[in-house]
């Protein structure tokens, strides 16, 4: 189980360390995916292309 800060609570230390590493890796991968999407969006804006529209979120 995770507390508000993302730390694992209520487990043995071996399991906790493993889960904390997985949580950190998942966070890093999420950031990398968002950065890639941002780069693609900026590149499309520069070239004037819109793509299929599925990757654009509009208010």
Image: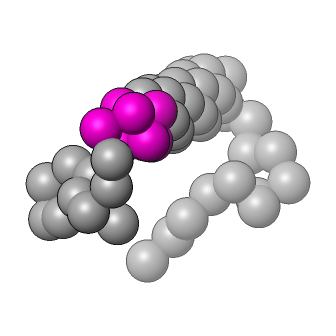
Q: Between 38 and 4, which is closer to the camera in this rendering?
A: 4
Task: Tell me, yes or no, if residue 44 can be seen here.
Answer: yes
Q: Residue at x 33, y 55 (%)?
A: 11
Q: Looking at the image, which residue sits at the far right?
A: 52
Q: Say if 39 sits above or below 1 in the image.
A: above
Residue 43's x, y, as percent?
Answer: 60, 22
**Quadrant assignment, res 3:** bottom left
Whether residue 27 is visible: no
Q: Give the camera-side residue of 12 and 43.
A: 12
**Image position, residue 56 (x, y; %):** 62, 57
Query: In the rendered view, does 4 fall on the left or right side of 23?
Result: left
Specify the principal SS of the magenta part. helix
Q: Identify whether 49 is placed above or below 53.
A: above
Image quarter of residue 17:
top left
Q: Quadrant of the N terminus?
A: bottom left
Residue 16 painted magenta:
yes
- Left or right: 4, with 47 as reference point: left
Q: Colour scheme of this structure image?
A: one colour
Q: Which residues are magenta?
A: 13-19
Is residue 9 a member of the stretch shown in magenta?
Answer: no
Q: Residue 35 versus residue 3: which sits nearer the camera?
A: 3
Instruction: Give the residue displayed 44% in from the left and 41% down from the top.
Output: 15
């Amino acid at each position: 189980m995770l507390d508000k800060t993302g730390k694992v609570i209520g487990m043995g230390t071996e399991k906790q360390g493993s889960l904390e590493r997985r949580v950190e890796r998942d966070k890093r991968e999420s950031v990398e995916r968002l950065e890639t999407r941002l780069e693609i969006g900026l590149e499309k804006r520069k070239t004037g292309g819109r793509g299929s529209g599925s990757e654009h979120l509009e208010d």
